[in-house]
Amino acid sequence: MKDLLELNRAAWTKEVREGNIWTKPVSPEVIADARRGKWSLLLTPTKPVPASWYPPTIACGGKVLCLASGGGQQGPVLAAAGADVTVIDNCPAQLESDRLVAEREGLSIRLELGDMRDLGRFDDESFDLVFHPVSNCFVDTVLPVWRESYRVLRPGGVLLAGFVNPLVYIFDMDEWDNNASLSVKHSIPYSDLRDLPPDVVERRIAEEEAMEFGHSLDDQIGGQIAAGFVIAGFYEDNSGGDLLDRYINTFIATKAVKL
């Protein structure tokens, strides 16, 4: 079997080809607004991040790491708003979207291909903000993401993270996809590679579908605290259309501060 990073790189390359909403570069109008100080971003599917969550240094060259955040969206907006931006992502096609926007708009953005769990190329205390939208469901362990984010942030730096409520993964996803009634089938932590039948895994790999993982809230929130962060903000969001939206919010965003 291919390495997990390689599998999900292929899956997100396919998503770029097929025009997934999270792979579409922002428009010139969005960049123009950001240059005038009118901008907002998403960590989760529908609810904008509160403006008060961002460090005040953003507009005057503050250093930002967009973590697993390629796609020509968050990185270019933050750069246009005045930040010194680095984007790291596992998918070259996603980084290409950032490059295209930067070239089109005359923005300077550092692009890095890599694993969100390994930020060893960056020095300690290098950034004022780590912006990490929903993406850690595509790695099998999340604790290194929090530890590395803490290491590369300066004292007073902020980690803004979005992630999936793990209850999503307890259900039979075939029923989910068919818009049927849902039945509980899996436990948390969840792994596509471990918990799905081998033939289903093989089919999904052949069809270049991403492998996902449902991390416990102990790892998602407790893991940030264990890494040294103080949780200073929290909100929930919905998916914008999934079956569970009428019952519960299935996405979470946190603001964590390195004191």
Image (spheres, grey):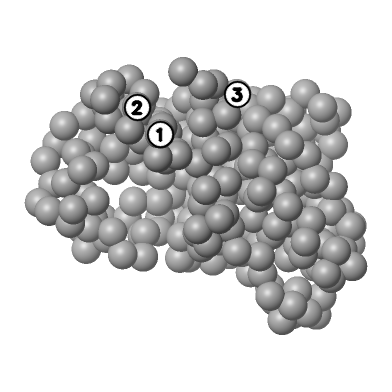
- Badge count: 3
Is disc 2 in contact with disc 1, using a CB cutoff of under 8 Å?
yes
Q: Quadrant of the C terminus?
A: top right
* 68 horizontally vs 242: left or right: right
Q: Quick one: label 1, few (<14), some, or many (20+) residues within 10 Å? A: few
The residue labelled by disc 3 is: 144
Dot 2 amino acid type: Glu
Q: Secondary structure at mark 3?
A: helix
The residue labelled by disc 1 is: 206
The residue labelled by disc 2 is: 202
Q: Looking at the rendered structure, which numbered label has been put on residue 95?
A: none
In this rendering, is residue 207 above or below 181? Answer: above
Dot 3 amino acid type: Pro
Residue at the (36%, 60%) spot, across then down? 238
Can residue 195 be seen in the rendering of this structure? yes
Residue 210 position within the rendered picture, expressed as x and y whole percent measured from the top left: 44, 38
Which callout, 1 or 3, points to the residue nearer the camera?
1
Dot 1 amino acid type: Ala
Which callout, 2 or 3, points to the residue nearer the camera?
2
Residue 14 position within the rendered picture, expressed as x and y whole percent measured from the top left: 52, 48
Q: Residue 227 versus residue 187: which sits nearer the camera?
A: 187
